[in-house]
Amino acid sequence: MTLPVVFSERAADDLAAVYGYLFERNPKVALALRFEVERVLMLLAEGVMEGAAVHLTTGESARRWVVA
């Protein structure tokens, strides 16, 4: 079962800034990072890797994966 992977607005902005910064300096590295992030996101979506279980204010359950 594939689950949705959702970014907070801040996380999406941070990731876009990182890609942009790297792309200006080294497009090859920026693309390699993007492919690796997408690979890990696929593993998360497929349940191969699991984050901590959390309960949302909506009553739904989710998994949280924090990247700092």
Image (cartoon, rainbow, N blue to C red):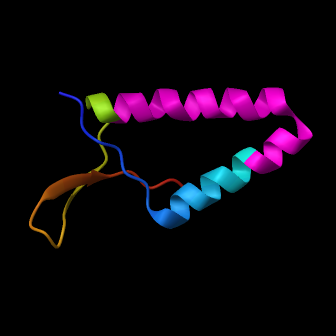
Q: Give the x, y percent position of residue 38.
A: 51, 31
Residue at point 49%, 26% (across, down): 39
Is residue 68 among the parts visible in the rendering? no
Residue at point 60%, 60% (across, down): 13
In-front residue for pair 46/67? 46
Vertical order, 14 against 46 (above or below): below
Vertical order, 21 against 9 (above or below): above
Vertical order, 25 against 64 (above or below): above
The secondary structure that most of the magenta stretch takes on is helix
Task: Specify the quadrant of the image occupied by residue 22.
Answer: top right
Q: Give the x, y percent position of residue 12.
A: 54, 56
User: What is the span of residues highlighted in magenta in the rendered image?
Assistant: 20-44
In-front residue for pair 9/39? 9
Q: Give the x, y percent position of residue 15.
A: 62, 52
Q: Does the magenta stretch include residue 29?
A: yes
Residue closest to the far bottom? 57
